[in-house]
Image (cartoon, grey):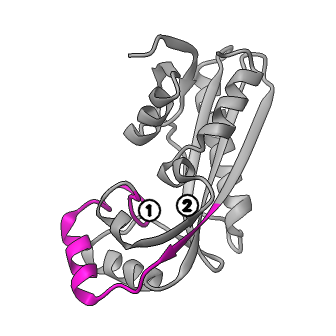
Amino acid sequence: MATAKNFILASGSPQRRALLADIGFEPKEIHPADIDESPLPGEMPLPYIRRMALAKARAVAAICPGENVLSADTVIVVGRKIIQKSPDDAAQEAVMRLLSGRTHRVITSVCLITEDGHIGQKTVTTKIVMKHLTEEEISAYVASGEWHGVAGYKIEGLLAGYVKKIIGSYSGVVGLPLYETKNLLNGAGIR
């Protein structure tokens, strides 16, 4: 286990915590942010995801003043459509049909508010080329339940067998672009 570093992770995501551990960055505390994640009327995906990451960092920084706070948010985007968490199997099947045979984007924004209030933010877009999914493949994926609790899917599971190509950051698709995150932390003197 890595030695705890001087930052708070504003996310309860086990994937983000595991990614940070992979590069030797264990947060000293974890405080998931509780904010309204609804898009604003007419809000485009890139401004939305940047706003979400910043809002999460600000929410935790407000209750933990004088601390370094790291947050991130990830969305799947088809065209201009932001894919939200599916409430049930039927909605998830519709998402899988939408993604089938298409190239879509996964956008992750990572934000660091330093103990002195400086805000650093990096946003990474990755293209995912998905194979055409059969109805059987869609049903099997939905039945697996891997999609519960995430918007769209988890790339690090069954769905990986349906991805033809990833153009960009694999760790960004999982939920935290490691190169950009390490640079933000290092820039704040967190090593």
Q: Where in the figure is residue 66, as x and y percent of width and height?
A: 68, 14
- Against 83, is 4 above or below? above
Secondary structure at numbered mark 1: loop
Residue position for label 2:
75
Q: Are marks 1 and 2 in contact (CB under 8 Å)?
A: yes
Secondary structure at numbered mark 2: strand
Residue at position x 71%, y 62% in the image: 46
Q: Where in the figure is residue 96, as x and y percent of width and height?
A: 38, 79
Indicate which disc, 1 or 2, sits on the residue closer to the N terminus: 2
> Does the magenta portion include 66?
no
Residue at position x 38%, y 16% in the image: 1
> Does the magenta portion include 150?
yes
Disc 1 to disc 2, C-alpha distance: 7 Å
- Against 28, is 109 above or below? below
- Where, by quadrant of the figure, is residue 61 drawn? top right
Q: Where in the figure is residue 132, as x and y percent of width and height?
A: 40, 86
- Residue range of the region highlighted in magenta in the rendering: 126-155
Residue position for label 1:
151
